[in-house]
Image: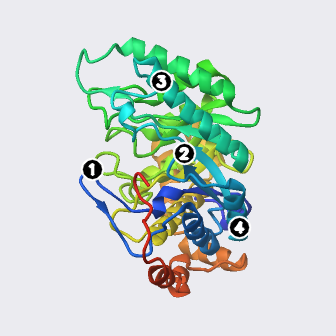
Amino acid sequence: MTRAFTEIADLLAQQAIELPSWAFGNSGTRFKVFGQAGVPRDPFEKVSDAAQVHKVTGLAPTVALHIPWDLVDSYSDLAKHAEDNGVALGTINSNTFQDDAYKLGSLAHSDAAVRQKAIDHHFRCIDVMNETGSRDLKIWLADGTNYPGQDDLRGRQDRLAESLATIYERIGEHQRLVLEYKFFEPAFYHTDVPDWGTSFAQVSALGERAVVCLDTGHHAPGTNIEFIVMQLLRLGKLGSFDFNSRFYADDDLIVGAADPFQLFRIIFEVVRGGGYGADSGVAFMLDQCHNIEKKIPGQIRSVLNVQEMTARALLVDTDALAAAQQAGEVLGANGILMDAFYTDVRPALAEWRASRGLPADPMSAYAASGYQEKIEAERVGGTQAGWGA
């Protein structure tokens, strides 16, 4: 028992998934960064590659930037380049984890001078936001400790709160501070923002324009992520998703690679909780580093996986589900969800794309476009973009 695909087509048309510029650069593991032919050498080429994903899927109209990796002389030129390629610039991500000064922390560091350095970096990110028209400043911190007694846990929370408040005061009226969390790595004893509760507590103290980013790979195995999604939506503090997948820890794999059913459950709670659609305020983004697969096809596969699970989540007969839940029909209620999950929406999506002037099969369309061969032939020489570049 599911809804008809025609009932959800208009809702699907509202979907937008932001791509990360860093997904198109070289990446790898903690042990090795792997190079590939055709990898971008500057932010302009990253944007060009991201635009190919939107061209064949119609799902990825914006590109998130990472500072300082994506510093350019003129953001108006970069924005114009994006516009010429059919996309726009989006979220600005800060970086306080690749400077020697941040070895023992950044916004939570015990040294006021180091904290000010990190704050100043975020001020520069806000300057970039003002130049690009970006709404969100996304902060992920590597801050934490490796050993018991290494630092004062409560003191670090106090310093973090003070630093975030200083940054929050600088953001504009139509901008947001988005605080991400991660339960471990690179700090292994404790992380200063390890979970949704800590992020929620910190942003709640700041104000209405401070919200939480949920990275689907930043949880311990077995965590009920959809419960967290529900709770943050219920509290009005879910600002964005970083969609990726992991088998054991933070692997940044293609979305849905490890557990497609989990992705379905997450998106169902997003839809149910009012977090889906152009006016929801919840941003869908990818956060991935394609280590061994080609960059652009990897992003295409991920956005399609999100679209497919969104379609299945929208197919749930919510009226029938509510009735079964109210009646205490345990198997009936579960069956309604499972009927939607097991529905193969791919043929209907292919027809729907074609009706909107998009390739029915985006993966094949990209492969046939010749773009991959073109960039591999042209992008010879120079320094390829990647982690730290």
The mark lying in front, picked from 2 and 3, is: 3
Disc on res. 30: 1
At numbered mark 3, what does the secondary structure look like: helix, strand or loop? helix
Q: Position of residue 270 (x, y in %)?
A: 59, 44
Q: Position of residue 239 (x, y in %)?
A: 61, 38
| Of 377 and 28, the residue lying toward us | 377
Q: Residue at x 36, y 15 (%)?
A: 153
Measured along the vertical axis of the image, is residue 200 above or below residue 21? above
The mark lying in front, picked from 2 and 4, is: 2
Specify which label sits upstream in the sequence, 1 or 4: 4
Disc on res. 241: 2
Q: Amino acid at mark 2?
A: Phe
| Of 71 and 321, the residue lying toward us | 71
Circle 4 is placed at which residue position?
Answer: 6
Q: CA distance from mark 3 to mark 1?
A: 26 Å
Q: CA distance from mark 2 to mark 3?
A: 27 Å
Q: Amino acid at mark 4?
A: Thr
Q: Residue at x 56, y 39 (%)?
A: 138
Q: CA distance from mark 2 to mark 4?
A: 27 Å
Q: Is residue 178 visible?
A: no
Q: Is residue 188 left or right of residue 93?
A: left
